[in-house]
Amino acid sequence: MLSARELLLKKQIQSMPDLPSLSVHVLQLIRLLGADEVDMQAVFTTIRRDPTLVTRMLKVINSSLYSLPRRIETVDQAVTLLGVKKIKELVLSSAVMDVIQSRDATLWEHSFSTGTLCAEVIRKHRIQVSPIIGLCALLHDIGQLVLSIFNAEGAKLAAIKAKSEDLADYDAERQIIGCDHAQVGGWLLENWKLDEEIRTIISVHHSQHPPREVLREVLLLRFCDAVDEAVRGKAVVVPDRDDLAVVGLDMLDFDEWADFQSKTLISEQK
């Protein structure tokens, strides 16, 4: 239940004229891919109308986020290999890349490396989790972008407060602005009419009491987010091992994965 202040902020944010948006082609693809019977010819045709989207889709699918055994050269190959559900995720991932990278390259680097880390953790430990977790990892901090547009001064003050007082960024945002980037990200995705599961995971990934039905996804995302943020020198709240144990994730070792992520980021910079 949102407070009166949060309800007001939500209304103000969702009505912003410069709120980040998805392209017409992406929205059309989401509708096509969400149909009970997907018209793949219409999907191919719509994708081909947007060369920029094609380029970004191929860049994402050939990245470490997917770690495919061979390079994909065409969207037709991607659709054949991945299937409808994964293509929908790929379309959204590519669109998110466009939205975030064009406005905040640093935020995109964190979002992408959190996504690749999440994929690696899942592979290593063979974790059973919702297939949309990769997309959630890419989207998890998009609310920071919205806050910087909605209240640039407040976002700057929150960042300064977090750094000077060794606070998590979401705590500082709540104190300065009255809501955090996780909530705001959920409000944006509501505007985009994305699936409820994605919106829920994003909006509560810093909540003290996430809904039970997405608890495993939230804690996994929170763990990977904390690892990547810590490696980048930010204050983080590491998920409690007892909380991780509730959803069978107590095998995750923070120091081990922080060392892994640190080496990964160093190798990518060479």
Image (spheres, rainbow, N blue to C red):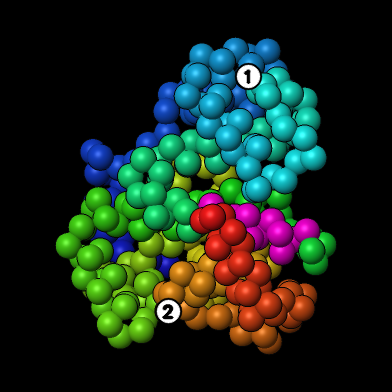
Eyeballing the image, is 227 above or below 55? Answer: below
Instruction: Answer whether residue 121 is magenta in the image.
Output: yes
Residue shown at the point (38%, 62%) measured from the top left? 181
Crowd band around label 1 with a 10 angstrom C-alpha radius: few (<14), some (14–19), many (20+): some
Question: Is residue 132 shown left or right of residue 202?
Answer: right
Please give the label number shown on residue 43.
1
What secondary structure is found at the residue carrying circle 2?
loop
Q: Position of residue 235 (x, y in %)?
A: 42, 79
Residue 165 appears in the picture as rendered:
yes
Please give the name of the residue rendered at 36% of the width and 81% of the height, measured from the top-left corner. 167
Q: Is 212 on the left or on the right of 166, as rendered?
A: right
Counting the numbered discs, the total is 2
Considering every residue shown, the one lying at the far front of the view is 270
The residue beneath circle 2 is 235
Q: Is residue 201 visible?
A: no
Residue at (26% x, 44% y) in the render: 15
Q: Which residues are magenta?
A: 111-123
Residue at the image position 65 percent from the left and 48 percent from the top: 65
Which of the marked residues, 2 or 1, is nearer the chain's N terminus?
1
Q: Does residue 207 appear left or right of residue 197 in this picture? A: left
User: Tag 2: residue type?
Assistant: Ala
Q: Residue 82 versus residue 187: which sits nearer the camera?
A: 82
Q: Position of residue 144 (x, y in %)?
A: 36, 58
Q: Is residue 37 magenta?
A: no
Q: Nearer the viewer, mark 2 or mark 1?
A: 2
Residue lying farthest left?
153
Q: Label 1 amino acid?
A: Val
Furthest residue toward right = 126
Q: Secondary structure at mark 1?
A: helix
> Is the magenta region chiefly helix, strand or loop?
helix
Image height check: is 139 above or below 60? below
Which quarter of the rendering shows the N terminus?
Answer: bottom left
